[in-house]
Image (spheres, coloured by chain):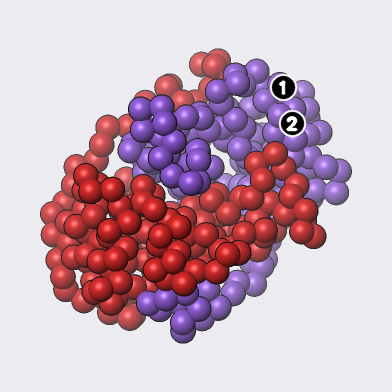
Chain colours: A purple, B red
Amino acid sequence: MELMEAIMRRRSIRSYRSDEVSEELLNKILEAARWAPSWANTQCWEFIIVKDKQTKEKLAETLPPPNPARGALSTAPIVIVACGRKGKAGFYKGTVTTVKGDWFMFDVALAMQNLTLAAHSLGLGTVHVGLFDSQKAEEILGVPDEVEVVEMTPLGFPDKESKAPPRKELKDFVFYESYGKK
Amino acid sequence: MELMEAIMRRRSIRSYRSDEVSEELLNKILEAARWAPSWANTQCWEFIIVKDKQTKEKLAETLPPPNPARGALSTAPIVIVACGRKGKAGFYKGTVTTVKGDWFMFDVALAMQNLTLAAHSLGLGTVHVGLFDSQKAEEILGVPDEVEVVEMTPLGFPDKESKAPPRKELKDFVFYESYGKK
């Protein structure tokens, strides 16, 4: 699929068919994440691929009940849990280098954007799920202290297409030469 | 350009020609950022497009001297400064909703990944620059308190191609069903 088409047509999918996703498709999607850039090439991202029904249901329970993605995490054949290893991105020889502290949220997002675009280009749906009890998810998955669960996405064939939510116009978020100047 | 080609061939470009970048190309790249997903569609990203030579040089001076991207920020015709508006991503009615606090680093990264892929597909180079004094950059650009400068990238036609730094193998960062399980 053409890049700009993938960028503009990707939607957040909250309704999935239960059809399996082949290893081949899954690996292509993970390969896309693998090629993301990262802080000094530290590649702090880690992914847990969950297919087990019980584990998916436990993960879904870490979401607050009104979240529309809750059902999607149980229905979709795969849940990808994106983690960040701490103390890598934003660090130099173990010391933090910027006021932002650990950059793992930034680098995991770069990889996840590649992953979700690749999924869309292969006919698969994803949706970023960030609003859940990540510490409970870490317990469920046995994630060690030096790693944090950042977000999750269901992965599967879309059952329903979603509409694109409206976007701000460029003039609302692009400035020239200094902040606020249009 | 095909999506997977863009993902796998994008390189961090640290050497630029001084040739101008047209408004048309610049707008296509910003349009790609515009279509990124974001926390509850809050779209907290903001961009400052810097072409003024003096401002670019001032921004370059916020980098520690050994950083190889320092020269690129002065030479490239454009510097894009990516900002995040605080209190949007990760919040619900003004209250933080997860242990991660503000998610602006995550959402700005999603938009920047779109932006850098689009630039590459149009023959332009970028490089993520995160190691600099962002508070000094905020002063230079008049960024208000409720917004933070996250990162910058030069934007221009590559003078030299870079090699891809090696990537971990999938087996080094992908686990199945629980953490660490291959």
Q: Quadrant of the N terminus of chain B?
A: bottom left
How far across and how far down the image is residue B122, in percent?
A: 29, 66
Give the residue drawn at x 51%, y 16%. B182
Q: Which chain does tag 2 point to?
A: A
Q: Is residue A137 above or below residue B38?
A: above
Q: Is residue B20 above or below residue A1?
A: below
**Total marks drawn?**
2
Give the residue furthest to the right.
Answer: A65
Asked whether residue A101 appears in the rendered view, the answer is yes
Which residue corresponds to mark 2? A59
Q: Is residue B129 above or below residue A107?
A: below
**Is the residue under label 1 in contact with that under label 2 (CB below 8 Å)?**
yes
Q: Quadrant of residue B120?
A: bottom left
Asked whether residue B117 appears in the rendered view, the answer is no
Q: Is residue B74 left or right of residue B141?
A: left
Q: Is residue B163 above or below residue B133?
A: above
Q: Amino acid at mark 2?
A: Leu
Viewer-proximal residue among A78 and A41: A41
Give the structural element (helix, strand or loop) at label 2: helix
Give the residue drawn at x 83%, y 42%. A64
Q: CA distance from mark 2 to mark 1?
A: 8 Å
Q: Quadrant of residue A147?
A: top right
Give the residue drawn at x 79%, y 50%. A68
Q: Which chain does tag 1 point to?
A: A
Which residue corresponds to mark 1? A140
Q: Amino acid at mark 1?
A: Ile
Q: Is residue A95 left or right of residue A46?
A: left
Is the residue at mark 2 from the same chain as the one at mark 1? yes
